[in-house]
């Protein structure tokens, strides 16, 4: 047996407290390292009856081989005679298994070198698995981290046992990420790598708004108020469609909170990003009107309501057109994402111009149709005249023939 003392166990317990990796993992790694070193020493990597046993109380560890008790030994590596087995254990019988210590002399240094490599590898594997399991369970949730540093393409955020990466596309435009600041991030994805898992976080994802509302609004957490849809342009504006499953609870009021305290907290967390909370409705007309708020709507005409094609034509007062469309089309763009409807917005004057142009086209079409009718009627009249003339000519020819037949031959000759 190799004397290792109690320092190893004390170090393992401290490592467990600091890293969260259990002492059993380290002990198991040490035993596996000792077995690997012994197999290399005897030049038999395929040996299956070798194991390392650790005596924690005595502070010793050794290598043992399991052998079967037989009458006649044919393979010394796997068998032992009954006589030799009795010296180890008096109660042993044939076909029993006994463990025999085979720890080589001066094996401590070789075992230590092998143990160092194996333990280091096992610690990395255990750490990687622990981080993977932890953050896989946190995927799709909101966590708090500390900004470590910035690079050209990403922000590195420490989230506890590992550092997460926030790519530029997941950052809020114009936001300055100062190292040392605490931020809330949304765990977007966890990718398994050969080293520690790579955690991808976001501050621009729409679901971060949902998580913040669930934290601040108890009615959403209790499923009394339901978030039906979210459309977000990070750093600028978000539209949120909510629905109350309890008629006595106002969905919009619950999200705003007493004197706006709840919505103010969320807006502050999102760096003063504007948030429009609208009521969800199964009626597409009402839903589109709500989604285009704060603009006033005159009318909504449904042009197409199919599974793959949903289009609506909206008319607003002249002074509300810019508000309905929003800066660079932001309001109507977010309304489209929120409702899933393609929305064409026109002012009253524009709608009248379109209607007037359509009416002129219709009148012109009617005039052309009248001309065609007149032409057709004239053609029919001409055909009737021609037909009558032809009939008169035919009758005249018959009468003349009758006259010719009735006249005498001589007259005919003359």
Image (cartoon, rainbow, N blue to C red):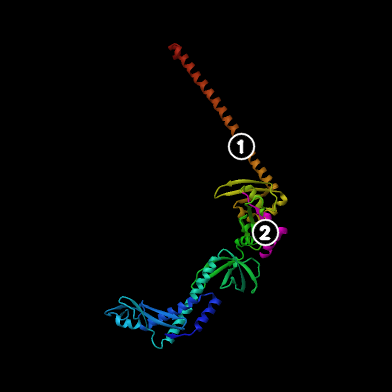
Q: Nearer the viewer, residue 143 or 303?
A: 143
Residue 269 shows which numbered tag? none
The nearer-to-camera label among 1 and 2 is 2
Q: Which of 286 and 236 is in front in this view?
A: 286
Relative side of 110 to 231, left or right: left
Relative side of 338 to 58, left or right: right
**Res 195 visible:** no
* Quadrant in which residue 69 is drawn: bottom left
Q: Is residue 109 magenta?
A: no
Question: What residue lies at 62% left-to-right and 72% top-to-bottom?
Answer: 146
* Residue sticking out furthest to the front: 91
Location of the N terminus by quadrant is bottom left
Question: What residue lies at 66% left-to-right and 43% top-to-bottom?
Answer: 355
Q: Which of 338 and 197 is in front in this view?
A: 197
Question: What residue lies at 33% left-to-right and 83% top-to-bottom?
Answer: 87
Q: Horizontal and vertical percent for residue 14?
A: 54, 79
Count residues near mark 2 (Cα–Cα under 10 Å), then give few for <14, some for 14-19, many for 20+: some
Q: Does the magenta stretch include residue 276?
A: yes
Q: Horizontal and vertical percent for residue 155?
A: 60, 71
Number of on-image labels: 2
Q: Give the range drawn in magenta.
A: 252-281
Label 2 SS = strand
Residue 368 shows which numbered tag? 1
Q: Name the residue under label 2.
A: 275
**Res 406 visible:** yes
């Amino acid at each position: 047996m190799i004397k290792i003392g109690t320092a190893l166990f004390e170090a393992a317990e401290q490592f467990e407290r600091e890293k969260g990796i259990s002492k059993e993992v380290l002990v198991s790694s040490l035993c596996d390292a000792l077995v690997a070193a012994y197999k290399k020493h005897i030049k038999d990597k395929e040996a299956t009856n070798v194991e390392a046993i650790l005596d924690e109380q005595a502070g010793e560890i050794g290598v043992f081989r399991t052998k079967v008790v037989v009458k006649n030994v044919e393979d010394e590596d796997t068998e032992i005679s009954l006589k030799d087995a009795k010296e180890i254990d008096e109660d042993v019988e044939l076909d029993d298994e006994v463990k025999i210590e085979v720890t080589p002399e001066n094996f401590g240094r070789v075992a230590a070198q092998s143990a160092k490599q194996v333990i280091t590898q096992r610690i990395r594997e255990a750490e990687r698995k622990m981080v993977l399991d932890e953050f896989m369970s946190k995927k799709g949730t909101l966590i708090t981290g500390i900004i470590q540093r910035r690079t050209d393409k990403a922000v590195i955020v420490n989230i506890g046992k590992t550092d997460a990466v926030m790519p530029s596309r997941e950052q809020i435009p114009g936001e300055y990420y100062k190292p040392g600041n605490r931020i809330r991030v949304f765990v977007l994805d966890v990718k398994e790598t050969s080293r520690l898992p790579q955690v991808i976080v976001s501050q621009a994802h729409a679901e971060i708004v949902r998580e913040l509302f669930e934290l601040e609004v108890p009615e959403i957490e209790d499923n009394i108020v339901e978030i039906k849809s979210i459309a977000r342009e990070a750093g600028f504006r978000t539209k949120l469609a909510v629905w109350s499953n309890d008629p006595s609870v106002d969905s919009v009021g619950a999200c705003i909170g007493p004197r706006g305290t709840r919505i103010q907290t969320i807006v502050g967390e999102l760096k003063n990003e504007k948030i429009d909370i609208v009521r969800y409705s199964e009626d597409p007309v009402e839903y589109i009107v709500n989604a285009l708020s704060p603009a006033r709507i005159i009318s909504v005409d449904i042009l197409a309501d199919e599974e793959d094609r949903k289009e609506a034509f909206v008319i607003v007062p002249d002074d509300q057109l810019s508000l309905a469309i929003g800066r660079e089309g932001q309001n109507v763009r977010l309304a489209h994402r929120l409702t899933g409807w393609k929305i064409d917005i026109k002012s009253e004057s524009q709608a009248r111009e379109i209607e007037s142009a359509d009416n002129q086209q219709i009148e012109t079409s009617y005039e052309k149709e009248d001309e065609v009718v007149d032409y057709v009627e004239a053609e029919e009249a001409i055909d009737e005249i021609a037909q009558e003339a032809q009939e008169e000519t035919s009758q005249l020819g018959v009468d003349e023939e009758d006259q010719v037949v009735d006249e005498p031959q001589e007259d005919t000759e003359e």
